[in-house]
Every structure is written in structure tokens, then in C-alpha cells.
Amino acid sequence: MPPAGGRYGQQLLSGPFSQHLPNSHLQHHPRQHQTPPSAGLPPPSFNPHQPFTHSNPNSALNPFAPTNGTNGLAAGFGGGGGLGSAGATGLASQAAVMGFVHGAHIQQQQAARDALRRSSGTGKAQSKNRIRDVWQGNLAQEMATIRELVDRYPYISMDTEFPGVVARPMGKFTTKQDYHYQTLRCNVDLLHVIQLGITLFSEKGDVLPAHGDNVLSNTPYQNSLIPCPTTWQFNFRFSIQHDMHNQESIDFLAGVGMNMEMHEQNGIDPQEFGALLISSGLVLTDDVKWISFHSGYDFGYLVKIMLCNPLPDEEGEYRKLLSIFFPAIYDIKFMMRSAQKTQMVNDSPLNTAAMAILNNLGAKSGLQDLADELNLKRVGTAHQAGSDSLITGRVFFAVKERIFNGTIDDAKYLGQVWGLHELSESRDGSSLARFDTQTTPNLNGATIYSTNGTPSTPNTNHTGLVQTPIQQPHGNGAGIGSLTPGNGVGVFGRFGFGKG
């Protein structure tokens, strides 16, 4: 259970929870952020030259200059620098000067429109789709907005994008679960998350209104021309030159439109994001339900960010942390695999319509496969975290209605994460069978698969760049080998690291 007290972190955490959090995160965060003077304007962007930053009043493109003013362009034309005299000719004439003023006004309007597009996303598509790109420059304001909304929209669908998989463990493992966790641990510890997408839903599956609703009070979107987002896409600092990555995964992400140069220059500081997340009301409470799809790695990266430390050596300790930070998790893939295996939901046989959906899916198990079967149209670009989080939430509520008959038995499905809980007991003590022989991150994390369903990494090239301990004693006495294959040196897929 989460610690007692207010969800917004008005007091320091204590008891068994305090030992898991770094001192940098145990700081006072006020419940409400002070509303900035520009609360009605679009959030600041990473571009220091956009017109919605604090403008220089002498700038040639000041969007807040009076529309009938000359904005400095008429100075020098005619006597006293006015709008030209009646008898003047050429460039000093009144008609010529007014023409200059009109042109400047058109430029100002265009600059304002460009700023609106930049502040609401990466372009027209992001603005239209209500997916908000969050960079370091607008992180605090967008997190403050989410704090205001999460009470009324407490279902959060989530997805991450990360730079693939670069290592596999070798050695002795007590269970296949242990092997999967050690694979997750060594990769999450070595790598850095690139994107996080979250979408807010109500308990009924509704997204946020775009305009003119009381729910938007105390947010910058209450009286803004820009529609309130449904989805926030957090873009983290990541450098191809300095951060380890699987090159195939980076190429894949670049192919779907991710701008890695922007991530390096304007990306979010993960530690600052972790501090804001802990005090946001999104975590450490079972009032908020997290919706995911095959999410072992997704939550692994978020736990690492909030801890500011590597993941625990033991899977059991990691599960404790996961239940503290995220007490209420639904993993759609776990729910679907359970229904396929048992032909039951909530201890009741599948209805005819649900059985038809599962039969049509067959061996297909991807998020997009399920969305297509449910006739759900994607908004945004696939394999970008914002779009993936939105379709994840829509799939969840469709699955709840059409397969689970509108009710999900939390005793069986809450807190189960596909990729970790392959052979486990549900909260009511009933056994859930293992469905797959191996689980690895899917394409949501930009892991590239071969036709037989296994990741393309590792290969047989020894790099020698990263070494992990060999034959360390395991908690129960069983030995565990190096966390990367190959005599304590490491066998990786093609990746880049430390080129700068």
C-alpha cells in the first residue's frame, strides 16, 4: 500500500518507503504551482526565439505590439519619424509607410501561428491530434497541469520508447522469471529511456475535453486558443554520441520521425522528471490506475528514474518497489493471454463475441493487432510514445467492454505485468499458467525482432566496452553468471557507445 498522507507529497515519506527514495527526491513540493503571468498563453517551448517568450519590445516581430502601430518601421520616414507627410513622395509617403506597417503585421500573425504550432507539438499533426510534446523548457508547466487533472482523470495509459536491447544474461538462474528479470535489469541499468507517453482517461474511458469545461479550470488551457491535450509525450535527454544504444533500434526510431538531435539539445533531465513525478499524484497511490501493454521494461525505466539508482539485484525486491510506486497496474497483454489460455474472464466463460475476437487474433499478439481487431483507429505516429499510449488506453477500455463484459476482477488481473508474471499467483490465490516460453520487449520499445519472434541481439561480436561481474553469489545460494553473455566480457548486438 502507498504511504499514508496527501498524494502530493506535502510531507516527507517515512517508514518502509523512505529507504527506497534518494535524498534529491525527498524535498518539499507545493501542491499547487504558482500560476505564471502567462498562464493563458501556450506553454514555453525549447525555442528561445519564439514570439511567446518574454519579447523584446524593440523586436521587429513583437506579437504584442499594437496592431495599428508602426513597430519602429516608420521611424525616419517623414518629419519627426511619423507616418509620413501628406506631401511626401517615394518611401517617405504615407501610402508607402502604411504598406510597410501592413507587411509587418502580416509577419507578426504568421510568427504567432508558428509559435502556436511549436508550443502544441512538433507541427500541425501534433496540434490537431492533441498530443503535447514536452521538453525541458515546458516540463514544469505541463506537470503542473497534469497534477490538476489526475483526480478527475485517474486512469493513465502509458508507453515508453527506449534504445533497444544490448545485453542478455548468462549463468545459473533459479527460474525463468529470474532470467527475464535479470535481462530487464541489465538493459535498463545500461540504457536510458528516450520517450514516455501518458494519456489521461476518466473511469468511463473519456479523454479530456478540448475547450470550455470546468475541468480545465486552474490550467493554462482554460481560456486558451490551444486545445487541451489528451496525451503528453515526454522527450528525454539522449545523445547518440555518449549514450549506449542498439543501432538498429535508433535507426528504427529515426525512421518513424524521432529527432535525436532535438533530444540531445532540448531533452528532459531524467532526475528532474523523477522528482516531479514523485510529487505529481500519479504514483505512490492506488487511486490512480496505470494501463500498459507488455510493460516490464516500461515500468523498469520509470522505477530507475525515481530511484536515481540501478534496479535491485533480486526480482523480489524489484516487485516490492513496483508495488510501492505503482500499486495499481493493468497490463493488457497479460489480461488477453489469460483469457486466451483459460477461455474465461472473471471466472466466467467467454461470450460468443469475445471468443470471436480472440479466435480472429490467433497467434497475433501485438498492440496494433489488437487495435485493428477492435476497429480502433490510431491517432498520431506508431512507435512514438504519445500515440502508443493513446491507443493503449483506447484498447484497454474496448477490451474491458467487449471481452471482460464491462468489469475487470482486480483480484486476478491488477498488478500483473506481462514479462515478469509469467508463472504466478493472482491476488485471490488462483494459479495463472505460463503462456509463452520467453518474453522480451516488443516493438513499443523499438526492439527489432526476427521472423521467429526473438530479438536480433545479441550477436557474436565481442566488444569489450562494458564488463559485468562474473559468478556472483545469488540470494538463495544459486550462482548467477555475468549479466552479458560471453566469459564475463559481453556479447552485444550492433550498438554505439562513447563515440564522443
Image (spheres, rainbow, N blue to C red):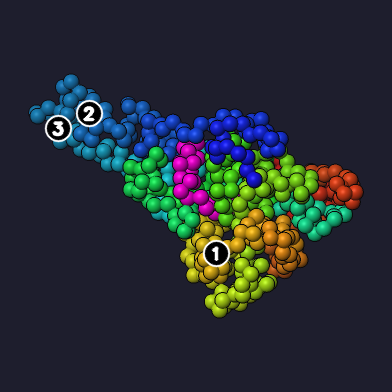
Q: Are marks 3 and 1 in contact (CB under 8 Å)?
A: no
368 sits to left or right of 164: left
Q: Is residue 117 above or below residue 22?
A: below
Residue 136: give x, y in percent of width and height.
Answer: 53, 37
Would residue 455 be seen by someone viewing this image from the given angle? no
- Chain-order first, disc 2 or disc 1: 2
Check disc 1 and report the residue beneath it: 407
Query: Quick one: which residue is furthest to the top in this view?
Result: 80
Residue at the spot 69% in from the left edge and 60% down from the top edge? 428
The quadrant of the rendering that contains the N terminus is top right
The Cα–Cα distance between marks 2 and 3, rounded to whole angstroms, is 10 Å
Would residue 411 be seen by someone viewing this image from the given angle? yes
The quadrant of the rendering that contains the C terminus is top right
Residue 457: give x, y in percent of width and height.
Answer: 74, 57
Residues in magenta, as a range: 140-163
Q: Check residue 452 for magenta coloring.
A: no
Which mark identifies residue 94?
Answer: 3
Disc 2 marks which amino acid? Ala
- Chain-order first, disc 2 or disc 3: 2
Which mark identifies residue 219?
Answer: none
Residue at the spot 52% in from the left edge and 58% down from the top edge? 393
Question: Observer-nearest residue: 361 or 147?
Answer: 147
Check disc 2 and report the residue beneath it: 74
